[in-house]
Image: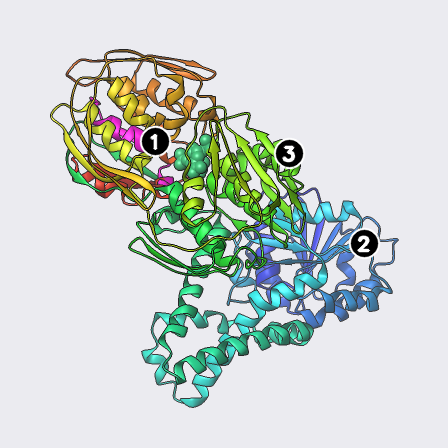
Amino acid sequence: MKVRESRIVIVGLGLIGGSLAAALRESGFRGEIFACDPSASEIELGIEMGLIDSGDTELASLVDDASMIVLAVPVLAMESVMGELAACLDRAADDVVITDVGSTKAAIQQAAERAFGSMLPNLVLGHPIAGSEKSGVAASNPALYQKHKVILTPCENTHSQAVRRVRELWAACGAQVLEMDVERHDQVLARTSHLPHLLAFSLVDTLARQDQRLDIFRYAAGGFRDFTRIAGSDPVMWRDIFVANRDAVLASLTDFEAGLGRLRQAIEAGDGDAMLATFDRASHARHYFESLLNKTSYQAEYQMQSHGKLNFRVSPGGRAQGQLRVPGDKSISHRSIMLGAMADGVTEVQGFLEGEDSLATLQAFREMGVAIEGPHQGRVTIHGVGMHGLKAPAGPLYVGNSGTAMRLFAGLLAGQAFDSELTGDESLSKRPMGRVADPLRLMGARIETTEGGRPPLKISGGAPLQGIDYAMPMASAQVKSCLLLAGLYATGDTRVREPAPTRDHTERMLNGFDYPVSREDDTCWLKGGGSLTAGPIDVPSDISSATFFLVAAAITPGSDITLEHVGINPTRIGVINILQLMGADLRLVNQREVGGEPVADLHIRYAPLKGIDIPVEQVPLAIDEFPALFIAAANAEGTTRLRGAEELRVKESDRIQAMADGLAVLGVPHEVLNDGIDIIGNGDSGPSYGGGCIDSLGDHRIAMAFAVAALRASEEILIQDCANVATSFPGFIELAARIGLTIDKETANA
Ligand SMILES: O=C(O)C1=C[C@@H](OP(=O)(O)O)[C@@H](O)[C@H](O)C1
Ligand SMILES: C=C(OP(=O)(O)O)C(=O)O
C-alpha cells in the first residue's frame, strides 16, 4: 500500500517515531519526513541514519507544510505537545491529519479535547502494539511494526478520509490495522500489556532490593530473563501509562491478585491438584494464544511456518512391511470432546487424536470454561458442564484448519445463550459455510457469514430454535451432525435426510451418551431438550490415516502390512471396498466392537491392482481417502474412473485439481472432470512414474498421498507445504519410516 502524504512530521524521535520513519523509508515512501524532538542530538542522529530529511527542537517551524503529524511522545507529554500544536496550526487544519502512538487512549482523548477545545475530525488516535525494551532513535527498527497490530480508536466525528490515511501509513509499515473504541482499547491493553509490565518491574525491583549486590542475578536463568525482559523498558513512558490508565490497570490488578491468592493457598495447603489444574489451563492457553496470533497450529513442527514452509523430500522406492497402529480417529475425537463437554459427569477418552484439528476443538471448550485434563498419550478427561453449562468465550474461537470443528460448533453454538464467533486459518476461511448457516437459520438461529457464506461465523446467542425436517443437498456428515447438535437445543424433532449414507459417529455417540437418535432409511432424527450422560470412549485408529499405508502396501511389490485396531464403521469403509474391487489382497481380522464402533486389524499384502469404475455409492464412504486412492489408481493397470465426487473440490484444497496437478508432475496420464477424474495407471512391475516437485497446497492428505507415491517413483519427490500433516496425522513421518518410506523434513523460506 502506498502512502501519499507529502510531508510527515514525527513529534518525538525515539524508538517508536524513529522506527516509523525507518519503516516508511523501507516501504519506498517518497515524501519528506521531518522530526521534532527536544534533543538536537537525536535529530542529528536521525538525519545521519537517513531516517529523516530534517528536524527541529521547535514544532512551529515544521508544521506549516505538513500533510500528516504523528505524535510519538510519552503519554503525559501529549497534552503540552497538543497545546503547542493548537497554537501553531493556524490554518483551518482540515487537510492535515494528526495521529498519535500513545499506549492509553482515554487520557489522550481528554487531553486533546482540552488542547483543541474538542476532538478534531482529522485527529485519529492510534496505538501500534509493538515496542522493545530499547529506547532512542539509535534503536530504530524498520521491521518493528511488521505483522504487528495497530489499533485505531476513531470517534463518531472523525473523518473517514483521515482514518483511511492513517490506515495507509501503518499498512505501509507492514502492520495489521484494526479499530476499536477508546474504552475497550484501554481495558484490553491494561490486561495484555500494562499488567505484565507492572509485574516485571515489580519482580525485578523486589529482587534487586533484597540483594543489593545483585548476586542472585548471576544465577538467574532463562525463565527469569524471559519473564523480566520488559522490565528494562523506558521508565518515564511507563510511569505515564500507569498514571493515564489508572482505573483499567487497577481492575486488572485486582483480578491478578485474586489468581495469585488462589495459587498461594494451593501452595500453602500442598494442593497439587489445584496447582496442576491452574498450570495445565495456563500452559494450554499459552499455546492457544500463540496459534491464534500466528493463525497457525499448536505443534512445534507447524511453527516452522513462521520461518518458512515445511517440505517433505521423499526418496524413491522401498518396500512396505510391518505392523503399526495409526493415531486415533479424527471424526470421533472431535465428537468425544463435544459430547463429553455437554454431558453430565466425567468422560474418560482413550485413543484421542492429538492432532491439530481435534486439539482445536479441545481448546475451544477450554475457552468456554470446560475443565479438560490432558491429552496425555491419547487420554483425556472431560469434566462435563451439562447442556447449559458452557460460558461465553472471551474472544473468537479459533478452530485452525478444521472444517469438522467449525461446522459442528456452528450447530452447538446456535443453541447457546451467548454470542460467539468462529474463525479459522487461511484454508478454512475459504471453505463454504452456507451449507450449515442456511439450515440453521431455518431453525431460527441468528448467524452471519462473510460474502459467499465463508468464515468467520458470527452466531448470536439466545435465539430460540425449532426443529426442522431438512433434506441435505449434499451427502455431508458435517452438515448432518451440525443440525443434530443444534436439534439438541430445539423444540420438537430435528430430522435430517441424506442423499447417500454418510459417517454416523454423531448418532452412535449420542446413543452411547443415552440420548436417543432414531433412523429410518435415509432419515435420522432426535427430539430436543434432553441431556447427555457421560461415559468412557475408546477411539479406534483412523481409517483415513490407515489408508496411506494400505495404499503403500497395495502398490509396492513384496509388501505386507498389518494395521491394528482400525475403525471399520460401515459408513467409513469405502476405501476397503474400493481397494478390494481393484484387486488388493486386503483382509479384516480380529473384528470386534469397541464402545459402539466396530474395529478390526487390517492385513494387506501386495497384489497387482487393476483400474475400475468406482461405484458412486462408495464415494461418501471414502470421501477423505481419494487422494491416496488416486495414487493406487496411478499404479493400477488400466483406467480408474471417479464420478460424483464434486465434494472433493471444497476440502482443505480442491483435491481433484491438487491431485491432478501433482499427477501431471509425475507424468501420470489423467483427465479432470467437474465431479471426478479418469486416471490411466501403469500396471508394470518397474517404477510407475517419475519424480518432481509437488505443491500440496497446505493440504495434509495431498502431502501424505504423494509421500506414499514415492514407493513407485523413479526419482525423488519433493512435496511442498506439508506442515498441515499435523492436523490429522501427527507422527506420520516416523510411522512411515517404520514401514520403509524415507521422508526427510526440510524448511524452505516462504
Ligand atoms: O463429520 C466428519 O467428521 C467429517 C465429514 C466429512 O466431511 P463432509 O461432511 O463435508 O463430507 C469428512 O470429509 C471430514 O474429514 C470429517
Ligand atoms: C476434509 C477433512 O477434514 P475437515 O473437513 O474437518 O477439515 C479431512 O480431514 O480430509
Which of the pair 709/628 is nearer the observer? 628
Residue 692 shown left or right of residue 61 in the figure: left
Tag 2 residue:
156
Tag 3 residue:
451
Residue 306 visible from this viewpoint: no
Crowd tier of the residue under label 2, counting other residues whose Cα lies within 10 Å: few below 14, some 14–19, many 20 or above: few
Marks 3 and 1 close (CB-CB < 8 Å): no
User: Magenta part of the protein: which range?
Assistant: 704-724
Name the colouring of the figure.
rainbow
Residue 99 visible from this viewpoint: yes
Which quarter of the figure is the C terminus placed in? top left
Marks 1 and 2 close (CB-CB < 8 Å): no
Comparing marks 2 and 3, which lies closer to the viewer? 3
Which of the pair 246/337 is nearer the observer? 337
Dot 1 or dot 2: first in sequence order is 2
Q: Position of residue 64 (x, y in %)?
A: 80, 54
Query: Which kind of residue does numbered mark 3 sit on?
Result: Glu
Comparing marks 3 and 1, which lies closer to the viewer? 1
Which quarter of the figure is the N terminus placed in? top right
Q: Position of residue 453 (x, y in %)?
A: 61, 34
Tag 1 residue:
570
